[in-house]
Image (cartoon, rainbow, N blue to C red):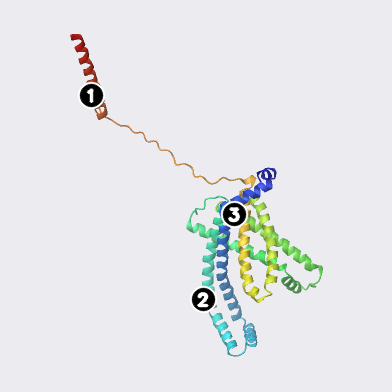
Amino acid sequence: MDRLRARHGWLDHVVKAYQRFSKQKGTFFAAGLTYYTIFSLFPLLMVGYAVAGYMLSRRPQLMGTLEGRIRTAVSGELGQQLVDLMNSAIDARASVGVIGLLTAAWAGLGWMYHLREALSEMWLQATDPTGYVRTKVSDLLAMLSTFLVITVTIALSALGQAGPMSALLRLLHIPEFSIFDEIFRGVSVLVSLLVSWLLFTWMIARLPRLPGSFVTSMRAGLMAAVGFEVFKQLGSIYLQRVVRSPAGATFGPVLGLMVFAFVTWSLLLFATAWAATASDDERESHVDPPAPAIIRPRIQLQEGPTARQTLAAMAAGAVGALTLSRLTKRRRR
């Protein structure tokens, strides 16, 4: 393996990216982001529910048509209960919308905060925020722009499917089985790929706490965009096959959404690790500088000999006295 890495630079780069992704717990962060993504969908559904309630309250004809279809599909007392339930839900549209907006803002800020923390980990950056208010405002702006771009790219991908494309061609009064069908489908895929490329590049380079190299992030963003587009096409085929059965129609979309979110975040974090380990953007881990050295001179003033010096002088005097006494005795003899 070491020989292959030394011979092929791209293989060495892939191995480095995987090691960075594994060491910085990329799978763990992808699973956490999947949880926050699914959790954030429920407040958004509440907001959509409130918007639908406002639309129905302002269109009595549409409301009457919907009630008629409910009574036709479900006759008797049960149909009337469903109509009453729909009317009471529409009356509560304001409270549902306010609660949905507040919950969506809270969940979305948590999602964006953990996303930026995960991207910063791939770059080996310090993740300490500079300030609470400044961090939340920055996360809010990043969340809104990210949500907008994600909505656009999913909408463009949906236009590539047969049903939405047929509706668009009928709206433009273009024959459905003309060559424009394939042209529009190809253009929608290319535009979706371009938007995804810009989205991933921006997320890799600018969402971390410290901005990374934009040129390197563009290469990583292109890799992530291609993988994301391929996975979206496979996901659309999966949903078409799964929803045919009752069990698949019940659990298939939920499982598919969880897998889609996990694979998307894993792909984004791996692409970020790839950008962080690029040969033209090698970055060492952050090391805090050592604390400044403090030199404190110590001056001690001593008056008179110390105890050790006194003992040493007494010992020397004893030895000298003993030597002198012996010399005196020898002379007398």
Residue at the spot of label 3: 206
Residue 224: x and y, percent? 66, 57
From mark 3 to mark 1, how far is it between C-alphas?
79 Å
Residue 73: x and y, percent? 64, 86
What label sits on residue 95 in the rendered view? Answer: 2
Q: Within the image, what quadrant is residue 43 found in?
A: bottom right
What label sits on residue 234 in the rendered view? Answer: none
From mark 2 to mark 1, how far is it between C-alphas?
97 Å
Q: Which residue is drawn at 65% across and 44% down?
A: 2
Q: Earlier in the sequence, mark 3 or mark 2?
A: 2
Front residue of 212/171: it is 212
Q: Residue at x 70, y 43 (%)?
A: 7
Front residue of 286/150: it is 286
Can you say whether 120 is above or below 321 in the image? below
Q: Residue at x 57, y 82 (%)?
A: 86
Q: Is residue 10 visible to us here?
A: yes
SS under mark 3 = helix
* Other residues around mark 2 within 10 Å, as few (<14) / some (14–19) / many (≥20): few
Residue at the spot of label 1: 314
- In the image, what residue type sits under mark 1? Met
- In the image, what residue type sits under mark 2? Ser
Can you say whether 303 is above or below 140 in the image? above
